[in-house]
Amino acid sequence: MYDISDLKVGSVFELEGEPYIILESQHSKMGRAGAVLRTRIKGLVSGVTVSKTFRSSDKFTPVIIERKKFQFLYFEGEDFLFMDLSTYEQVTLGKTFVGSAKNYLQEGESYQLEMFQGKPIAIDLPVKMNFEVIQAEKGLKGDTASKTTKPVTIETGLKVNVPLFISQGDRIVVDTRDGSYVEREK
């Protein structure tokens, strides 16, 4: 069991049968009243973010989040099909569950899915991923001194702003947290 001194940003605990992760926390001591913990927490199943204050007498159950390797097979309509690489079971995830991760999913690639009580709750993408540029406008020749960028389309359909020297067929590294260009693949 956790008490409020064990809870920090990133801690996962169970509240009312659902796993929550702490996004922000602030401990404060209120004289005779005892310590309190003011937090902003996010439900890992529902995705709802709420502010909650806990007292020093509150106890919390730690949550075991299992990470399993799944292969992304394909998407059909609004469904994304994944296969568990250890059991070969297939799991269908909806468009709302996948969310912005759809911009980085490549068929045949493996990804970590976070599981709670045997059900997927999140897709854990790598921070940096490599993609091929499938559509790019021509850049101005010799314009390398300025920090001018141009939009390109990568193989998943996402538009990324890149330096002018990137052309169609190049492979680039993209930061999956914000969809920004990092570098040309080495």
Image (cartoon, rainbow, N blue to C red):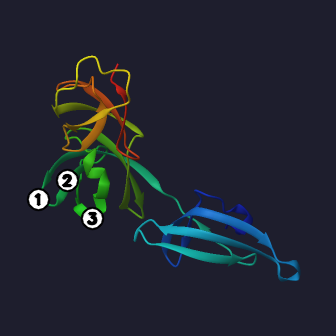
| Left/right of residue 164 with respect to residue 137 in the rendered view | right
> Between disc 2 and disc 3, whose residue precedes?
2
Dot 3 falls on a residue whose secondary structure is helix
Where residue 80 sits: x, y (%)?
20, 55
Q: CA distance from mark 3 to mark 1?
A: 12 Å
Q: CA distance from mark 1 to mark 2?
A: 11 Å
In this view of the protein, can residue 132 be seen by the observer? yes
Figure check: 71 above or below 19: above
The residue mark sitting in front, 1 or 2, is 1
Circle 3: residue type: Thr
Q: Residues within 10 Å of mark 1 (few under 14, many from 20)?
A: few
| Left/right of residue 25 with respect to residue 134 in the rendered view | right
Figure check: 138 above or below 62: above
> Between disc 3 and disc 1, whose residue precedes?
1
Circle 1: residue type: Gly
Q: Residue at x 25, y 45 (%)?
A: 105
Circle 2: residue type: Leu
Q: Quadrant of residue 151?
A: top left
In this view of the protein, can residue 84 be seen by the observer? no
Q: Nearer the viewer, residue 101 or 143?
A: 143
Dot 2 falls on a residue whose secondary structure is strand
Which of the numbered marks, if any, corresponds to residue 62?
Answer: none
Q: Residue at x 23, y 50 (%)?
A: 82
Number of numbered tags placed on the structure image: 3
The residue mark sitting in front, 2 or 3, is 3
Residue beneath disc 2: 81
Residue beneath disc 1: 77
Q: Residues within 10 Å of mark 3 (few under 14, many from 20)?
A: few
